[in-house]
């Protein structure tokens, strides 16, 4: 059986990694190399790195004496070159193809160049509006990126629906007063009470009426024992 959730936003805002693009293998390779170079616990880094800007994670974990700017530049360069294994999240291409221009944006903790590379590697179109790590002073969980995207689309943040897959992004959406939809299996504190979908195949957008999009979310009901 399938239950449905209906939403009526004026705009859709998407995170990229884990929401539109599955870059898990690349992200893990990058942070494991970083951990090996500096004798750090890779699992601890990976537990908190997702959804945050690279430089912020480097600053948090790099040992004393490490040049944070140089290490960040090295990691970003590695990520830009490494697209092996990047694939679209199921349903992403079909969903983006049906969205009206001027009604959606990508808000990502990746830089602009990296965003272009990963979207292209996944075979997805570049968004009409992109707010990247290069465009904000503070990354997620700050709401700055989502507030900037809503302003650029000329909608109130509370009239937007945000698709996210990680704690930092979900907290950013909540701080922006937007409705958040969890994509995937994340179950952390910020996901509590949010509608969720397994992937983007469960998101249907049927058009816009007087500036309002008709969005339907479908997901399996929990199995009762």
Image (cartoon, rainbow, N blue to C red):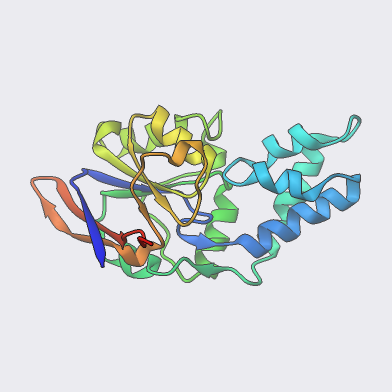
Relative image position of residue 50 (x, y in whole percent):
61, 47
Question: For the point 59% across and 62% down, which residue is it?
Answer: 23
Count of numbered labels shown in the rendering? 0
Q: Is residue 130 above or below residue 224?
A: above
Question: For the point 33% across and 47% down, which residue is it?
Answer: 195
Which image quadrant for residue 54? top right
| Rendered-image quadrant of the N terminus | bottom left
Closest to the observer: 88 or 223? 223
Closest to the observer: 50 or 101? 50
Extreme-front residue of the structure: 225
Which image quadrant for residue 24? bottom right
| Rendered-image quadrant of the C terminus | bottom left
Relative image position of residue 76 (x, y in whole percent):
70, 50
Relative image position of residue 113 (x, y in whole percent):
58, 53
Which image quadrant for residue 93? bottom left
Q: Is residue 106 left or right of 208 when viewed as pictured?
A: right
Question: For the point 85% across and 35% down, which residue is it?
Answer: 67
Closest to the observer: 155 or 199? 199
Q: Is residue 162 left or right of 35 when viewed as pictured?
A: left
Relative image position of residue 52 (x, y in whole percent):
60, 41
Question: For the point 89% across and 29% down, which residue is it?
Answer: 64
């Amino acid at each position: 059986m399938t239950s449905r959730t209906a939403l009526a936003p004026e705009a859709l805002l998407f995170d990229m990694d884990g929401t539109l693009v599955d870059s898990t293998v690349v992200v893990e390779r990058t942070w494991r190399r970083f951990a090996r170079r500096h004798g750090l616990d890779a699992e601890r880094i990976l537990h908190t790195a997702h959804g945050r800007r690279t430089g912020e994670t480097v600053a948090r974990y790099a040992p004393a004496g490490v040049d944070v700017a140089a290490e960040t530049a090295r990691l970003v360069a590695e990520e830009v070159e490494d697209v092996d294994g990047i694939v679209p999240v199921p349903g992403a291409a079909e969903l983006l193809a049906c969205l009206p221009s001027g009604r959606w944006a990508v808000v990502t903790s990746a830089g602009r160049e990296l965003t272009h590379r990963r979207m292209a590697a996944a075979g997805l179109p570049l968004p009409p509006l992109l707010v990247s790590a290069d465009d904000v002073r503070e990354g997620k969980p700050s709401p700055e990126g989502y507030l900037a995207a809503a302003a650029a689309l000329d909608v109130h943040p509370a009239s937007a629906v945000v698709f996210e897959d990680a704690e930092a992004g979900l907290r950013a959406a909540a701080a922006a007063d937007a409705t958040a939809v969890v994509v995937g299996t994340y179950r952390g504190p910020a996901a509590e009470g949010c509608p969720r979908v397994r992937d983007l195949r469960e998101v249907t957008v049927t058009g816009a009426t007087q500036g309002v999009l008709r969005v339907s979310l479908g997901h399996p009901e929990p199995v009762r024992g």
